[in-house]
Amino acid sequence: MTTNLMNNWIGGQLTPSSSPSTLYVNCPLDGRILAQVPLSNAADVDSAVRAAELAFTGWSKLPIKERAQIFFEYRKLLIEHQDELAQLVHEENGKTIDEALAEVKKSIEVTEFACALPQLTAGEIMEVSRGVECRTEFCPLGVVACITPFNFPNMVPNWTIPNALCLGNTMVLKPSELVPMSAMRLAELLKQAGLPDGVFNVVHGGKDVVEGLCDHPQIQAISFVGSTKVAKLVYVRASAHLKRALALGGAKNHLIVLPDAHLEMTANNVTASMAGCAGQRCMAASAMVGVGDVDPVVNRLVEEARKIVPGMNLGAVISQAAKERIERYIDEAEAEGAVVKLDGRGVKVPGFENGYYVGPTVIDHVKPEMKIAREEVFGPVLSIMRTKTLDEAIDIENKNPYGNAAAVFTQSGGAADYVRERASAGMFGVNIGVPVPREPFAFGGWNDSKFGVGDITGKSSIEFWTKAKKTTRKWNAEARSNWMS
Ligand code: NAD
């Protein structure tokens, strides 16, 4: 079979990798081969970094208002091409078209934030003493690198591209080798928007490229989004090379449900959070902790989950290996005594028999010490734990090592605040199952869900992608006055 061997994107051109290693890219919906992606090497990384370095001088010298114009244009192109971009995400990632479109719309929103960066980064200036002024300005870092996961092929690269570039940096992106195609389309649209060649580069591959980026002496900062295991490796390796690093990791998000929770709203939210994007979201609800009698909510959410049908309103998971891993978690939970109330194992979608589908799964009476309660499953699987008191529920949430998101479902403002103050998570929802902050609020978790200071989007990203220059100047020539006078 002949399949299209993809290229890297270096200096604004399609550039073949110098590595002979490749990987097939499969469509999760039906297993069909979509492309062949190169597993690039350190020489490819070096070419991309050199192109980015070359472009940095001209790009960083442009006034930020000029750079922002390109992102106004990029935003327009994302809107014009949103259906095509969503189709690409649908094919390479396996999520539904609606979910893919929502992802592209989020990319548009973060690009809008970048368009506002000239206003947001207007420096401070003040006369701190007679005739003496201090001013702050935000300077770009240089060449930066971004490493992204498979679950949002369009949105996660866009968490960093518009902000880091508009702030004057140049970039090498390493997308997930499982979903390499969206990043190439973004590269084309950026060029079409007027981005100078070399400002944005894409190097495909896996571990070797990531290590090459962490080790490369000309890369100033690295952002990573992916599993906790790799986030730790990248954070440690990049920091050891004295780079600025921000590494977002995996998650195990707990939704605490109180008996007074609104029945329909809670059931709908918990189900949508668990099954959206086939559970492959770092913000997905994978654990519900019911306090007291929450049987009505559990029964209702099982009813809701039954309406979620693989191949219709539920997409595929990323690979056959992922499907098998998710089903193993369900097998083990059942063997340990949990009750599978809705079973998504072994589903086949007619006409898409080679696709990687797992149906919505609800497992009740899970105990906190079970593997399924402790680890990230990353599939459309909800584990329900039961406690007698709210403090026990909070204790379960606090003890899990992750800290991306948590939520509470209740009609009591006091109870909601009680949980909010005690939850050990960076993003918190009150009667919201997927509490993703909208721009300009920043995205980022706590604990093992993030390593490094600050968040990846919003105002926090300005500090990550720039260094502040503080100037103190005096034009007053009075001989006896010093800068403190
Ligand atoms: P992953 O960690 O397997 O891969 C992420 C990136 O790291 C990819 O580009 C991959 O090529 C690279 N990589 C993989 N193994 C590596 C290794 N040993 N050394 C160096 N690089 C390596 O993650 P994934 O499976 O693509 O994505 C799913 C994970 O990402 C989940 O854990 C999910 O929770 C997490 N995620 C987190 C956030 C967040 O904001 N915290 C957002 C999206 C996804």
Image: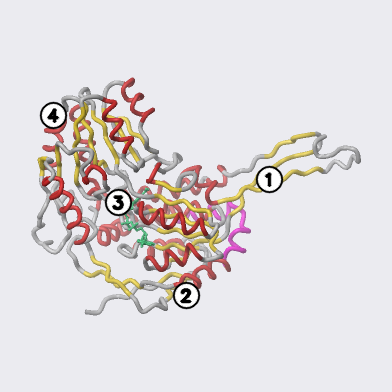
Whether residue 219 appears in magenta in the rendering, the answer is no
Report which residue position mark 1 lands on. Answer: 470
The amino acid pointed to by label 2 is Ala
Report which residue position mark 4 lands on. Answer: 295
Is ligand 1 within 8 Å of the beta carbon of the residue shown at mark 1? no
Count up the numbered dots: 4
- SS at circle 3: helix
The span from disc 3 to disc 2 (Cα, nearest Å) is: 36 Å
Residue in the picture at 40% in, 42% down:
447
The span from disc 1 to disc 2 (Cα, nearest Å) is: 37 Å
Q: Earlier in the sequence, mark 3 or mark 4?
A: 3
In the depicted structure, whether residue 482 falls above or below residue 377? above
Dominant SS type (magenta): helix
Question: Percent from the top left, x then y, of residue 275?
Answer: 21, 45
The amino acid pointed to by label 4 is Asp
The amino acid pointed to by label 3 is Leu
In the depicted structure, whether residue 385 falls above or below residue 112? above
Is ligand 1 within 8 Å of the beta carbon of the residue shown at mark 3? no
The span from disc 1 to disc 4 (Cα, nearest Å) is: 59 Å
**Magenta part of the protein: which range?**
55-74
Q: Earlier in the sequence, mark 1 or mark 4?
A: 4
Residue in the picture at 41% in, 59% down:
147
Residue 273: name its quadrant: top left
> Badge 1: few (under 14), some or many (20 or more) residues near its Cα, within 10 Å?
some
